[in-house]
Each structure stands twice: as structure tokens, then as C-alpha cells.
Amino acid sequence: MSSVERFQLVGWKGGWTLPSVDPECLRAIVFVALSKSPVDVMLNTSPWNAPESVYPFLCGPSPKSIKSGAENIIKYLKTQGFECCHDSTHITPYEEADAYALESYTKSSLAALLDYLWWADEDFFRRVSQPWYAKDSTLFGKFVWVHYQRRRVMARLFTTPDTQLSVDKMEIIRRKIVQKAKQCLEDLSVKLSDKTFIFGLQPSALDATIFSYLAPLFYIPWKNKDVRQELFMDSLDKFKNLKSYVDRIRKRYLDGTNLSVQTVRRPVRWYDPIVNRIQKHRDTLIFIAFAGAVNLYLLRRTIGRLRV
């Protein structure tokens, strides 16, 4: 790869001081920053612009996609000679095996929690997640893709042999998800201890993964009080080093001019104010429509009786 050749990393847009709210997009972005790869970050708001509607993906000088998914992107950039400081100079075989195990453990433990908070929590989905996607999405994305994605996540989180999932069983699954995530946070806190990065003074690819799954937990204002209490309110001192860790990486590598980031926003359409008003008063409109249907049914029934 020539010195002037640059790549383009495309992912979901960000919020709450994070360049992206999607953990895997955030993982790829942080690796680019840590490894100082010649990559420009382009943040998008439409799932239709990604291969198979999956972000992130990496493009070369031509529009053709090169690699999709954070794992494949990171592996590809490493083959091009772009690695984090610790990976390229100091990593030992033991640390390499440890990094693989910690990465898998972190993703399997925290991904389910983030999916639950972002998609399955009814109040947060209605007040935050859905409007967040709808703000810059197309008309089809506002009403179709968001709910389709939510159904996919819900099916993955609450898959059981039962044909019907009761509220009690959903609560049991939620508690298991939260408990597994809390145990992971405790283990990561012990592993990090008072170090600057997981393996010491220099960052590694593992730091990109751990940051990408920790940062949304700390920065996004989750509304579920039960989850917040189970995870944080009784353990603030225990997880203080994790909060300092994500603050340090964000300020050192993601703020300022260290990263070339551009957000592509959809042009405002003529129907956007109408759609936003419908979404804002959705419950009222549903009630009015239901009441109208009932009144129409009763009116037709009354007329039919009078004719008899």
C-alpha cells in the first residue's frame, strides 16, 4: 500500500461524546486511532448503504467494499502493517492467548446487555433508540427497519423452547444477562487494576475491543433504573478504574484532531415534519383510530337493527 493511499471506514453515527454508538463500529474506529492507520472515518445513518445492511465496512480508493465487520477490518489492517504499539513490539505468546480469551469473554458478556438496554427496554426504545434512528433515517427506515431490527434482537435475546414467553421468564433472562455483565465488569476491573492499558503503558487491539463495549455503558444515559442499580450504584468504587480507563482512551485518541471523522446526514425531506409529528403523538393517534373503529362498528350495528 502506498504512503498516500487512504482507506475509508464506514459505520453507524455516534452520540453522547462517542464517534459511534454501535460497539463493533466503535471497535474498528478505536483500532484505527490506536494503530494510526491511514483511514478516514465516515459515519452514516442508513442501513441500506452497507453491504448486507451490516456496519462497519472498509473501502479502498474505489467504491468497492474490501472488508466487512470489525474483526475482518482489524485483521486486514494488521496485514498491511498497522498495529497498536504493544502488539507490534512487546506482546508475548501468553498475552496473545490472554487477549483472545478476554476479547471473547467481554463480547459475549456485554453485547447481550447492550442489546437489551438499546432494543429490548421498552421505555428506552420508545424515548431514545427509535427517535435516534428516525432522526436521520429514510421514511422506510423510520417505520420498517428499526422495528425489524428490534424483532431480530428480541428473538436472539429471549429465544426459549417455549412457544410463549411470559413476563416472569423475560425477567429471569434479564437478570441472567445483567448478572453475567456485572461479573465481566468485576473481572475486567481486577485485570486492569491501576494500569494505563490492559497490558501496561501501551495500547493493544484488546483495548479497542474492551473500550468499545465499556464506553456505551458509561456514556449513554440508560433509563432502566433496575439495571443501573444492579450494575453501578452499589459498585461505583469498584468500577472507578474502568471509568477512568474509557475516559483516558476517549480523550487521548478520539477527541481533537487525532481522527478524521465525517458524518453523512440525510437531506431534510418535505414529509419529515409530518412523520415526526405522527411519531410524537403515536399513542394518541392509535387510540383515536381504535375509538373511531369501535364507533363505526356500533353505528353500523345500530343501523342494521333499525332496518330490521
Image (spheres, rainbow, N blue to C red):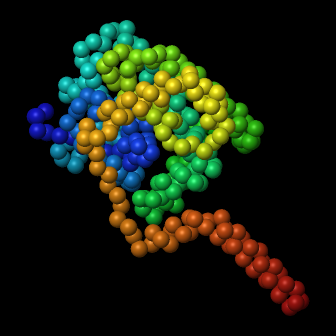
- Residue drawn at the location 63% of the way across and 50% of the way down: 123
Quadrant location, the C terminus: bottom right
Image: 84 above or below 137 = above
- Determine the residue located farthest toward the front in the rendered image: 237
- Residue drawn at the location 38% of the way across and 39% of the way down: 25
Whole-percent x, y for residue 8 in the image: 24, 43
Image: 268 above or below 265 = below
Q: Can residue 140 be seen in this view?
A: yes
Callout count: 0
Quadrant location, the N terminus: top left
Q: Is residue 283 left or right of residue 253?
A: right
Q: In this view, does 47 lie to the left or right of 299?
A: left
- Residue drawn at the location 74% of the way across and 42% of the way down: 167
Q: Is residue 101 visible?
A: no
Image: 69 above or below 90 = below
Whole-percent x, y for residue 307 in the image: 86, 91
Whole-percent x, y for residue 111 in the image: 51, 33
- Residue drawn at the location 22% of the way across and 49% of the way down: 63
Whole-percent x, y for residue 16 in the image: 45, 45
Q: In this view, does 117 lie to the left or right of 46?
A: right
- Determine the residue located farthest toward the bottom in the rendered image: 307
Q: In this view, does 121 lie to the left or right of 143?
A: right
Quadrant of the rendered structure where residue 112 is?
top right
